[in-house]
């Protein structure tokens, strides 16, 4: 079975999208290839890293990335976490967004 590709996007790729990426990868890595990105990436919030470490989740592969990194790549699902309408509008011009997806039936 080919893994579905999931991209989580928020403005800074520093908290919400990083949490989502790390948790989904930890729980369902056999079903999904998971990434995160931001429209204005700034680096990962150290408190988020500590939360993930406390949950027993490996943070060594996490890094803030710009959404342009994923332009032209095949992505099955994109979940957008944004509170800035302008940033979301800019991103939506580039990629179709599907915000709901079912976890695999196990």
Image (cartoon, rainbow, N blue to C red):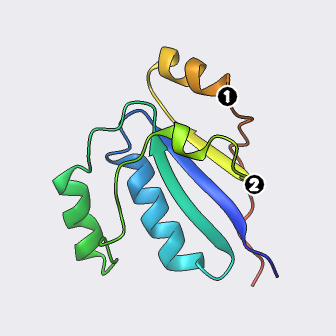
> In the displayed structure, would residue 60 be above or below residue 18?
below
Q: Position of residue 8 (x, y in %)?
A: 54, 49
Query: On the image, numbered disc 2 is attached to which residue?
Result: 76
Residue at 75 percent of width and 54 percent of height:
76
Q: Quadrant of residue 61?
A: bottom left
- Residue at 64%, 57% in the rendered image: 6
Residue 31 is labelled as none
The residue under label 1 is 94
Q: Residues within 10 Å of mark 1 (few under 14, many from 20)?
A: few
Gap in angstroms between the C-alphas marked 1 and 2: 15 Å
63 left or right, relative to 70: left
- Residue furthest toward the top? 86
What residue sits 64% from the left and 83% below the top? 30
Q: Residue at x 73, y 73 (%)?
A: 3
- Which of label 1 and label 2 is nearer to you? 1
Q: How many marks?
A: 2
- Within-10-Å neighbours for mark 2: few <14, some 14–19, many 20+: some
State the SS at label 2. loop
Towards the viewer: 21 or 55: 21
Q: Position of residue 101 (x, y in %)?
A: 73, 55
- Quadrant placement of the N terminus: bottom right
Q: Quadrant of residue 57?
A: bottom left
Q: Quadrant of the C terminus?
A: bottom right
Q: Classify 21 as above or below 78.
A: below
In the depicted view, which residue is nearer to us: 67 or 30?
A: 67
Is 88 rendered above or below residue 4?
above
């Amino acid at each position: 079975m080919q893994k579905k590709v999931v991209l989580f996007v928020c403005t800074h790729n520093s908290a919400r999208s990083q949490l989502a990426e790390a948790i989904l990868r930890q729980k369902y890595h056999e079903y999904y290839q998971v990434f995160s990105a931001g429209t204005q990436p700034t680096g990962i919030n150290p408190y988020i890293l500590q939360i993930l470490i406390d949950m027993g989740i490996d943070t060594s592969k996490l890094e803030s990335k710009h959404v342009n990194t994923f332009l032209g790549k095949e992505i099955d699902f994109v979940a957008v976490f944004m509170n800035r309408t302008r940033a979301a509008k800019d991103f939506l011009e580039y990629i179709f967004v599907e915000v709901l997806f079912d976890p695999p039936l196990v």
